[in-house]
Amino acid sequence: MKNAELFERAKKRIPSGVNSPVRAFRKVGGTPRFIREALGPYLVDCEGNRYIDLVLSWGPMILGHCHPEVVDAVIRQAGKGMSFGAPTELEVRMAEQICEAVPSIEKVRLVSSGTEATMSAIRLARAFTSRDLVVKFEGCYHGHVDSLLVRAGSGALTFGVPDTSGVPREIASTSAVLPYNDIEALRAFMAEHGVRVAAVIVEPVAGNMGVVLPKAGFLEELRRITRDHGALLIFDEVITGFRCCYGGYQDMVGIRPDLTCLGKIIGGGMPVGAFGGRSDIMALLAPEGPVYQAGTLAGNPMAVTAGLATLGILKRENPYAGLAHSLEVLTASVEESARSAGIALSVNRVGSMAGIFFSERPVETFDDVMACDAAAYARFFHLMLDRGVYLAPSPYEALFVSTAHTADMLDAVAASARACMAMLSERV
Ligand code: KE4
């Protein structure tokens, strides 16, 4: 079947034809590619078109698709049982590996998605502090948790209003939304409301408005000011965990949050999330504590096996410097191509993740992101897709490279970008 035919067929039985909105290509237009298989850095769609994949399932596939060690481990586990609903040694090993890797995590609970991780961490923080208010930042995304699907209300520093239908205003108002990277706004809010704040949750590197890096001192101030007000600091490292370095972005910058949320890479492509941190906080979780949290497939042996294999390879091979170099070379080439074509482009990068913005100015805040030329990104996306390069079908996502992307392959991507920038400049 053709992609377009499959899309029409899908829409008959799946809302918008997809199981997650961003896959519908609504931000870039056109027809989603229905992927049949993948190997290494490549995706192959239902028509047999092959693409170099720079989305990597939104981050998990840091080793590329179908890494033989990961596949072998999952096949072996399948023969031993898919799910037991009972504890396994696999989960103990995963917990030990996460605690050993991430400095601030003393105890950890496995769940089945990043959303479950952040939802549980928020509930735990509210119980630990006996406070209700949670602070998040505009442009950061923490999964589809009711109380976090909020945007800043009218006025200056205000409480959240629903950013989606179906969330009661009362729930949205238990969150406050501040500008990312704005230390003064943070100080002012905490000075007035700090005693009510249970937690501040932040993506230490924002990966859901493109990639926006924390300004110098922003995270350090977050750590200081939350501690001063008795609020918990939650790092949502669902994207950055094991992506930027083995210990997560917190290990790169030497900051210890009270709780950390993980996902994506720790599942190696299968459904795993996790939340963890200080033992005294985690002790509140049921059954020993009063905070209920549960999951039929939490710690699922198949998913944990894929995650353990992935983390084991990352620990053994420590590919992070190579990944960062690959990304640096690729994105520097894209920037040069844009410059040569007279196109305003700004790239943010950290480790093996980057954000490409069609912007005259550096992109450091949500407002900067909103001022970028999203239509230009959409044109660039399709020009690259036509040349066999699969970028994120939204300007508000990240670009990732994996250990499977060879230098030659990334040179080919750079060459495609050069050609596409030239075509874009002809159309400007
Ligand atoms: P999931 O529930 O989708 O596993 O994780 C939610 C989540 C939590 N925190 C961060 C920082 C995240 O980036 C995510 C999910 N990321 C998006 C893409 N940026 C998932 C893609 C999708 O929604 O389909």
Image (tube, rainbow, N blue to C red):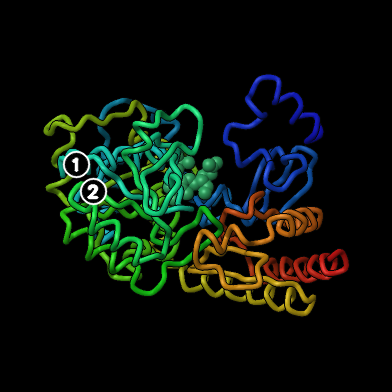
Q: Position of residue 128 (x, y in %)?
A: 16, 42
- Where disc 2 sits, the SS reads strand
* For the residues bearing labels 2 and 1, Cβ distance under 8 angstroms: yes
**What's the distance in space between the residues labelled 2 and 1, CA to CA?**
6 Å
Q: Residue at image x 75%, y 50%?
A: 50
Q: Residues within 10 Å of mark 2 (few under 14, many from 20)?
A: many
Residue under numbered circle 1: 131
- Would you say 10 lies left or right of 115 here? right
Q: Residues within 10 Å of mark 1 (few under 14, many from 20)?
A: some
- Where disc 1 sits, the SS reads loop
Q: Position of residue 253 (x, y in %)?
A: 33, 71
Instruction: First in sequence, mark 2 or 1: give its number.
Output: 1
Judge by depth and name the residue closer to the eye, 348 or 150: 150
Badge 1 residue CB within 8 Å of ligand 1? no
- Would you say 115 lies left or right of 50 here? left
Q: Residue at image x 54%, y 60%?
A: 367
Residue under numbered circle 2: 197
Q: Quadrant of residue 4?
A: top right
- Would you say 231 lies left or right of 209 here? left
Q: Residue at image x 25%, y 58%?
A: 257
Task: Indicate which disc residue 193 carries.
Answer: none
Q: Amino acid at mark 2?
A: Val
- Would you say 341 lies left or right of 86 here? right
